[in-house]
Image (cartoon, rainbow, N blue to C red):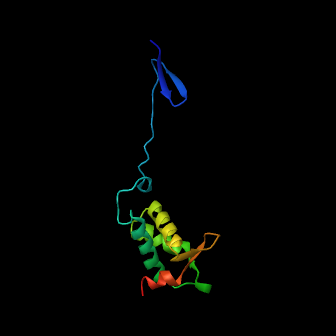
Amino acid sequence: MDRVWRCRDRAVPLGDRTLVMGIVNVTPDSFSDGGLYADPEAAAQKLIEIASGIKPVQDGHIFIELLNRPFVFELNGTPAEYGTGLKLAIDRGWLWKHESGTYVKLTQSGADLFT
């Protein structure tokens, strides 16, 4: 009897010595564990809190790594949580991100959240 493994629009013939192997990605950022910042609102607010404690350089610039580093490495947020929090903070008008992606500015509405 011919055995065939069907996967979408492909058919793979299975012989007596056919082995199927898979890869499981278990890196910390590959899944959400429902951590503190799984809620985008919580992540965005934490990023604004971090930004409000950073002394900006010229014209209010806050280099993006100054937000990323404490969020991911000190607070144990995941890169995915950081990304969704940053997007929400920008969408809400709390942060403005330069087109280069290298820095942000805390807007007045963002600053008002923690004053």
Which residue sits at x=55%, y=84%?
Answer: 56
* Count of picture labels: 0
Q: Where in the figure is residue 12, as x and y percent of width and height?
A: 52, 24
- Of the pair 68 and 60, the residue shown nearer to us: 60
Location of the N terminus by quadrant is top left
Image position, residue 48 (x, y; %): 46, 77
The one nearer the camera, 22 or 86, is: 86
Report the residue that reaches farthest toward the bottom: 115
Residue 103 lies in quadrant = bottom right
* Relative image position of residue 5 (x, y in whole percent): 47, 25
Residue at 49%, 72% (x, y): give it: 89
Residue 3 in picture, x, y percent from top left: 46, 18
Residue visible at 48% across and 84% down? 111
- On the question of residue 45 being in view, the answer is yes
**Residue 99 appears left or right of 115:** right
Q: Is residue 5 above or below residue 107?
A: above
Give the residue displayed 42% in from the left and 84% down from the top. Answer: 114
Q: Is residue 54 visible?
A: no
Q: Is residue 6 above or below residue 93?
A: above
User: Residue pushed farthest right?
Assistant: 100
Which one is in front, 88 or 21?
A: 88
For the C terminus, which image quadrant?
bottom left
